[in-house]
Amino acid sequence: MRVLLVGGGGREHALALGLAADPAVSAVVAAPGNPGIASVAELRAVSASDPAAVAALAVETAADLVVIGPEAPLVAGVADAVRAKGIAVFGPSAEAARLEGSKAFAKDVMTAANVPTARAYVCVDEASTARALDEFGAPYVVKDDGLAAGKGVVVTDDRSAALAHAAECGRVVVEEFLDGPEVSLFVVTDGEAALPLLPAQDFKRIGDGDTGPNTGGMGAYAPLPWAPPGLVDEVMRDVVHPTLAELRRRGAPFAGLLYVGLAMTAAGPRVIEFNARFGDPETQVVLALLETPLGGLLHAAATGTLAEHPPLRWRDGAAVTVVLAAQGYPAAPRTGDVITGADREGIIHAGTARRAGDGALVSAGGRVLCGTATGVDLAAARDAAYALVDGVGLAGSQHRTDIAAAAVDGRITIPG
């Protein structure tokens, strides 16, 4: 099986490693890829959000399966263009990808499917936003309705900051605050059958102790030793299957990766958001523990045969990933700095590039790379991940020092 992987971030590097390790995968082509992905795949230049260009590349490379990593190509309809060529693709249609492309659409689907989630209002002007903020009270939760690369959500006690964010976005969803630890659950689906992966937890804010602005994610770990037994079954029953059924009813079946972001509240799990693709950096830890061949799993979802796929197999132990970000991230990341020590196993490339002229590895984005490690338990995996990050040289870089610390110390509790 020849696979075309679309994207060039840390998520795609983790996917490329998983696909290349599948004995059934004969070749991986990544477009546009990154220097880390180049070690296991052929790189091809393409505009990832150009449906016609990606579909043409899929034909040119004789791909048997196209795996679309980022959200922007999915919302742009890349999966539809590839399917129109008769090629199997892992990723939802543009219509189904509105679950991520529009927070208002996702809320509408959840309401129709009776999915447990936060109360919310869609607001388009200052007056409606102010009314919603006053009804829910602090902490205020304001979400950009559209795609914002993981940085469109503001949670604040400052009402003026909440109003300012809403004004900057234009169309927003204002929600009641959901209190409790967060869980990321990935679900592979062909639109009807659905297989959950291991729950993970990520860390959105830039600073230790969940301080500072939101980012695309500063680290993650799996599994979750504090998660209640039966959590995954409950979420599949109350969230995933009703959502998939509602999308089928609307004529927009969702085939690909449904990401369910949850808050573990005193009243039970509540959906914070849906994404239409693998999360980054949770993908790094979940796939590090997946023993089942990845290519075959994604191909089954892409071809409507997931119900026939054998049960998933998982490695023992735990996995932790720690993101190394550029100086100035997330507001104004500095790029072009030389990186050293990034050629070791477990270093996942996210925002890296080769410098013209001498080919030096340099930073090319906000989240530059991450150290991903497994261990016999969470403490061992955490130590190994930090050892990887500590071995990387990048001027002015920043990373959190508390990834998975609370879970290791048993300090995570569910309200109520």
Image: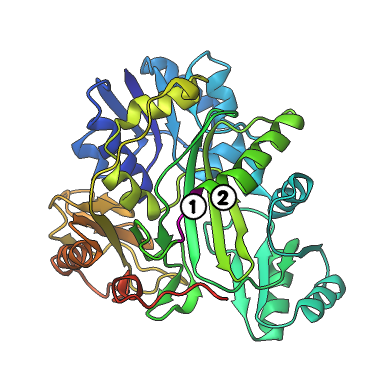
Could you tell me which residue is drawn at 73 percent across and 48 percent down? Answer: 105
Callout 2: helix, strand or loop? Answer: helix
Q: Amino acid at mark 1?
A: Gly
- Which quadrant of the view contains residue 347? bottom left
Circle 2/circle 1 CB separation < 8 Å: yes
Q: Is residue 230 magenta?
A: yes
Q: Is residue 1 shown left or right of residue 49?
A: left
Q: Is residue 323 magenta?
A: no
Q: Position of residue 23 (x, y in %)?
A: 22, 23
Q: Quadrant of the C terminus?
A: bottom right
For the question of whether residue 108 can be seen, the reply is yes
Residue 113 located left or right of residue 45: right
> Left or right: where does residue 194 sit relative to residue 337?
right
282 relative to 90, above or below: below
What amino acid is found at the position of numbered circle 2 in the picture? Glu
- Quadrant that contains the N terminus: top left
Q: How many marks?
A: 2
Image coordinates for residue 86, horizontal then vertical, percent: 52, 13
Density class for disc 2 (Cα within 10 Å; few <14, some 14-19, many ≥20) is few
Q: Look at 64% across and 67% down and name the residue there.
A: 267
Q: Which residues are magenta?
A: 228-232
- Magenta span: chief secondary structure: loop
Estimate the x, y position of residue 272 in percent, counting from the top left: 61, 60
What residue is shown with label 2?
234
| Tag 1 secondary structure | loop
Picture colour scheme? rainbow
Q: Which label is found at residue 230?
A: 1
